[in-house]
Image: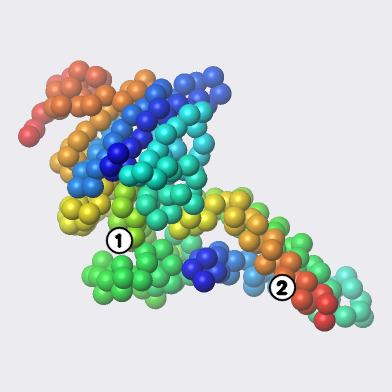
Amino acid sequence: MKFLNQFWVFYKKLIIPSAIVSIVIALIGMGNINIIAASGTVFIFITPFFHFIFYDLSNPKEYYFYYNVGLSRWMLWVGTIVFSLIIGGVLALI
Amino acid sequence: MTGLHIDSVIKYFGIKHILNDIFITCEKGEIVGILGRNGSGKSTLMKIIFGSISAENKFVMVGSKPINTLADSADTIRYLPQSGFLPTHVNIRKLISVFCGKQNAQFLFTHELVKPYLDKKSEELSGGQRRILEIVMTIYSDAQYFLLDEPFNGVAPIQVDLIKELIRDQLPNKGFIITDHDYKNILELSTKIVLMKDGSIKLIKNQAELIEFGYLPVGSVISH
């Protein structure tokens, strides 16, 4: 529970921009197929991209907040990929 | 073995030997001040102790617990980096509740230095306000040992005094390793002073030695 609470602070920065961009890409690129499923598929790939842009590229010093609560960069990357797979995967299967 | 024990730290950047067999200890109730010129390896040493960067060799223990990774240091060592580390997308209240533990968070929610900013995001605060929050959040967290890298940088003198008091108040149960270019405050606050020079640590017994070892210019006023 503690981990989820800490990780949610990290992931919250990614989820809204990733969701918006996923929907836009799905609308533009997928024509008249299932938009929710297409958005989910895009979400799986776009969230790690935003992780890289927002944290590794733009603001790497923010990692120290998470290091201090015991979350390493490796754990945060694994978390992003796993959570994105779960959220995107569930949407893709709808 | 008691306290925070750091031994045999060796670090190279390329062919440059940054840290050469460093040994430091810090007990609860101690404030170890590290002085040294720019590039002497103070921040690198703190990051190695904390576990956020690797070293060619290191031996870090808290009591009988070895500290090799960030996960090992999570409940025992906190590190305040030189530059701001607070996430900008969440309000201060949420950051404190995640960072400080339940009991400390309840205390900080009513603290005069913190209360005015609870519902703001760190990006809405000035650099000095952010720095004070980072320091307060760090020292009021559940760890036992604290590595403070340039804590006074960007903080108004009157608030530097307040921060020094906060650190002293924590002393019986916590230990601090602190570095800052504001050497007068480090000398005043610390219970033990070490100087980093040429990749090694020298224990400083008096301020005259800081001149002798080339940290302070000849003719510096020595006060007690």
- Residue A39: quadrant of the picture: bottom right
- The secondary structure type at the circle numbered 1 is loop
- Name the one closer to the observer, B119 or B61: B61
Graded by Cα atoms within 10 Å as few (under 14), some (14 to 19) or many (20 or more), the crowding at tag 1 reads many
Residue A85, image x, y percentages: 74, 66
Give the structural element (helix, strand or loop) at label 2.
Answer: helix
Residue situated in front as seen by the camera: B40 or B10: B10
Where A73 sits versus B195, above or below? below
Comparing A77 with B57, the one in front is: B57
Q: Quadrant of residue B180?
A: top left
Label 1 and label 2: CA atoms lie apart by 35 Å
**Residue B160, relative to residue B211: is it above or below?**
below
Identity of the residue drawn at 22% across and 33% down: B193
Q: Which residue shows up at 59% across the image and 57% down it? A: A76
Tag 1 subunit: B
For label 2, the residue is A87
Q: Which mark is residue B140?
A: 1
Residue B61 horizontal side relative to residue A4, left or right: left
Q: Residue at x 41, y 63 (%)?
A: B99
Coordinates of residue A2 in the picture (x, y in percent): 49, 68
Q: Quadrant of the N terminus of chain B?
A: top left
Query: Would you say residue B201 is visible in this rendering?
Result: yes
